[in-house]
Amino acid sequence: MKDNSRRGFMGKAFGAVAGVGAIASLFAMKKTWDPLPSVKAAGFTTLDMSAYKENELVVEKWRGKPIFVLKQSKEMLDTEDKNMSQLTGKTTEAMDKKRLIRIGDAEYMVTIGLCTHLGCIPGYNQDKKSFLCACHGGMYDDTGMVTKSPPPRGLDIPPFKIKGNILVLGEEGPEYKKMKETGITL
Amino acid sequence: MAHFTKATSIKDWLNQRLAIEKVEKVMASEYWIPKNINFLWAMGMVLVITFTFLLVSGIFLLMYYQPNVDLAFDSVNYTIMREVDFGWLWRNVHGVAASVVFLIIYIHMFTAIYYGSYKKGREMIWISGMLLFVAFSAEAFSGYMLPWGQMSYWAGMVITNLFSGGSLHADGLVEWIRGDYVPAQAFLSRFFMLHVLLIPVAILGLIGLHFGALRIPHVNNQDGEEIDFDKESKKYLAGDKAGSKVIRFANDFMSKDMLVVAIYLVFFFYLVFYHYGFAMDPVNFDPANGLKTPTHIYPEWYFLWSYEILRPFSTNIGLMAFAFAQVIFMMLPFLDRSPNTVPASRRGLFKYWFWAMLIDMIILTAMGKVPPIEPFGTIGFYAALTFIGLWIALPIITMFEKKA
């Protein structure tokens, strides 16, 4: 009996030490797979917004991702787009144009250029003023809102801060925080 | 301690230390295989041979491949294909075998479904086989990343994005898997590691389990007959080879196996030398570019059916349907409620279920290949619904199956 309880204790002690070791190694393994600090500190992208032309899509780069910049023409602003927001369930009127960023006198669409479905890059059709993702046929209008499934939400807007004519990507300005709060972007 | 005597021969010396005669009997000459089988029973050996080709050709590719985002593309398309003597041979063998291995796996799977080789003690054979299918899928995907062409990059982007779980927005998980915001160096290095070490080790272990799972229930036969292997093998060893229902694994069964393998290899090397293009997508001969999506992204043919189950639905439903398709085959032994272990042709409604499933998967495969335009989108949508419907129907139709 005495022997048994000693064995039992030895077994439990061994198991406990091995268990702690196993959890500690799993933790180390998980952390080893994490993105490196140098990757995380990939920094900021600065865009001079006066250089863009109306209805002409320019693809910039931020943290390895493509960024769509589309300056809106008057015609684009006047057209009410038929889109949908599966994310918020809000109607077209409530969402339309609110995704645009106003800098000086002009309105810009600035979004991450990856389809919110599975991350392909949609192509822009200048005449139709809409984006088409070739992977699974999703479509967006000229403000980056979804007009055809399967994308679950409009193109994501990267964190931004307005500094006069300059837009800094990667920093959260008050305009971006407001968009996040109101559910215009994630 | 065991008693050792002076060896009379090398064989005797080994026998005393490793019991090689006993091992040979257990593994080959007294491992019994039913006589009542056909060429479809050779697919296991065909897979072993194909896997060996993948391993050997992979070793030679590994000597020149560079897992670096700046060098990978050229190390494959220039160094291996043009500079290394016979480098093209290893790449063609590796690419063709990676594609053909899935064809054989599907034949192997549907043979098992047709003959009911997943029931009556053979459940673990089926489950370990499906785990092998998962491991081979992961191996194929990780290998597809390595040439770092446009299709590598964008397949990597799309497939890792699946792990965000749709509305769950587990972007942190996706970034953790990639080691970066987008597929980049960290991603390439870790998928290289998975492809050449971790997954192959897992595959070797699973092959051991798959073979081990066969030993107690034994190989099934064309009629699903329950054979008394002890009795039949005694009959065979006593000299009544004609009357026994079994033969030795080696050399008897192996000689039949190797005939099928030989015919297969003619087809295989025809592809390697004259038709390797099907295994190498032209789009992947453009270097990876994170700022330009190819106009039409599709996976290799063997993933098309599950891709098409994902595609016609909205994100969340699509992901659920996709997850369903990935695991449901694993559940087959438990969803088939009928005790009958006979060919599908003698199983009433199950016969139609089998052919409907096979045809539906071929339709899904075809629809996954074409661009997402009408009428293909609609056909794919209904084929995906049919797939799910068939699995829901399976327990019901097999429950009412008459005893064969």
Image (cartoon, coloured by chain):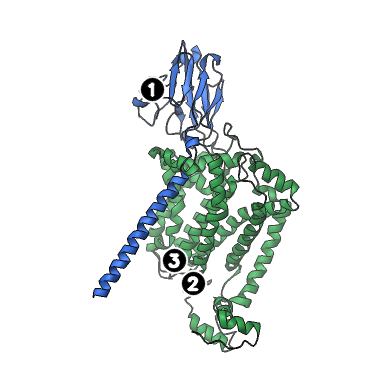
Chain under callout 3: B
Q: Nearer the viewer, residue B141 or B377?
A: B141
- Residue B150 lies, in percent from the top left, at 61, 38
Mark nearer the N terminus (2 vs 3): 3
Chain under callout 2: B
Q: Amino acid at mark 2?
A: Gly
Q: Is residue A93 left or right of residue B140?
A: left
Q: CA distance from mark 3 to mark 1?
A: 54 Å
Q: Nearer the viewer, residue A114 or B205?
A: B205
Q: Which residue is mark 3?
A: B123
| Location of residue B104 (image quadrant) | bottom right
Specify the label residue B269 is tagged with: none
Q: Amino acid at mark 1?
A: Met
Q: Residue at x 66, y 52 (%)?
A: B61
Vertical position of residue B332 compared to residue B75: above or below: below
Q: Is residue B328 left or right of residue B247?
A: left
- Residue B268 lies, in percent from the top left, at 68, 58
Q: Amino acid at mark 3?
A: Glu
- Residue A40 lies, in percent from the top left, at 47, 35
Q: Which residue is mark 1?
A: A95
> Among the chains, which one is green?
B
| Location of residue B21 (image quadrant) | bottom right
> Among the chains, which one is blue?
A
Q: Is residue B99 visible?
A: yes
Q: Which residue is mark 2?
A: B224
